[in-house]
Image (spheres, rainbow, N blue to C red):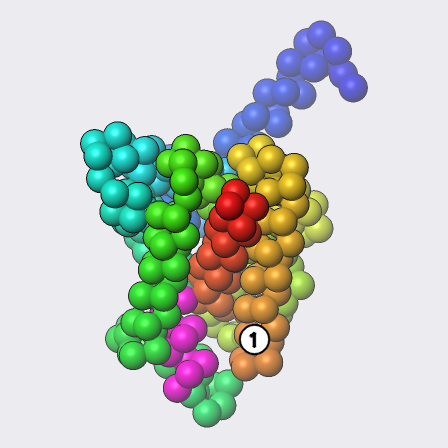
Amino acid sequence: MPSGPEFQEFAKRQLSGWWHDMAVAGGFLTRLPFPVPAGAGRKGALARAARAFPLVGLVVGAAGAVAMLAAAGLGLSPLASAFLGLALMALITGALHEDGLADVADGFGGGATPAAKIKIMRDSRTGVYGMLAVVFSVGLRAGVLGGFNNPEIAAAALVAAACLSRGLLPVAMHFLDPASKSGLARKTGRPDQEAWVTALVLGGLFAFLFLGPLGGLVAIVFGMIGAAMVAWLAFSQIGGVTGDVLGAQQQVAEVAILIAAAAIAS
């Protein structure tokens, strides 16, 4: 480990690198005005910045948690507070992940072949499968959050779920091939081992921080199962991953993590 001026230079490089990756990841995953760093538009830039996905989740989840707590402080019911928190998170992300879930539900439910499924997923229109998937996702998350006895615990669970669910995405990006020759997954590139491991570990650390040892462990298991189910389904349906699949994976993992947190808290 360097010391003195060398350590300062080392720390400066590390902080600069993390901020660069945070800006790249945040600029893609949210509507927040992150500064556009040099090289952000190059092929593979997002894949290299994937280690920062849980940090973006921290920002998004913290905003939703603050909205929930503020609503609870104003006397709103736990369910209404949960809906407000989720609504703010969707506003911050531009409903990016919800849109991916809807497209996957429409494509997998309506297409007869992998090519047909991908074509439906690229259609900007939303069908019945997609609408129901989003309704179930939002409803399940709001229902689980509204069922916590303590709003502070619900807020902590929301932040943990936002961080960990996004920390799982680089794993699928690394291990699954892009399902399309011209889709987002191919343009994004494949995170290297250091990036996906860092994202997974960071997401897990946030889960332990906000949910405690037992809650964090169970949340990690549930989140990985949810993410793995979507990955398996995508592989069997279209042979790989797309940007929409990653959105669906985040939504399913977030629901699973919240359920795990509620089960431990009850």
Q: Position of residue 114 (x, y in %)?
A: 51, 85
Q: Position of residue 110 (x, y in %)?
A: 39, 86
Q: Position of residue 123 (x, y in %)?
A: 32, 77
Q: Look at 51% across and 45% down and name the residue there.
A: 266
Mark 1, Cα crowd under 10 Å, few <14 / some 14-19 / many 20+, is some
Q: Is residue 113 above or below residue 167?
A: below
The quarter in which the N terminus is drawn is: top right
Instruction: Please tell me whether residue 63 belongs to the stretch shown in magenta.
Output: no
Q: Look at 52% across and 43% down and name the residue there.
A: 265
Q: Look at 47% across and 86% down and name the residue there.
A: 115
* Location of residue 51 by image quarter: top right
Q: Is residue 206 above or below residue 227?
A: above
Please identify the residue farthest to the bottom as the structure is shown.
Answer: 112
Taken as a whole, is the magenta stretch helix, strand or loop? helix
Q: Position of residue 99 (x, y in %)?
A: 35, 64
| Nearest to the observer: residue 235 or residue 115 | 235
Q: Helix or strand or loop: what does disc 1 sit on?
A: helix
- Which residue matches tag 1? 233
Which region shows up in magenta?
101-110
Looking at the rendered structure, the kind of residue marked 1 is: Leu
Q: Is residue 251 above or below residue 151?
A: below
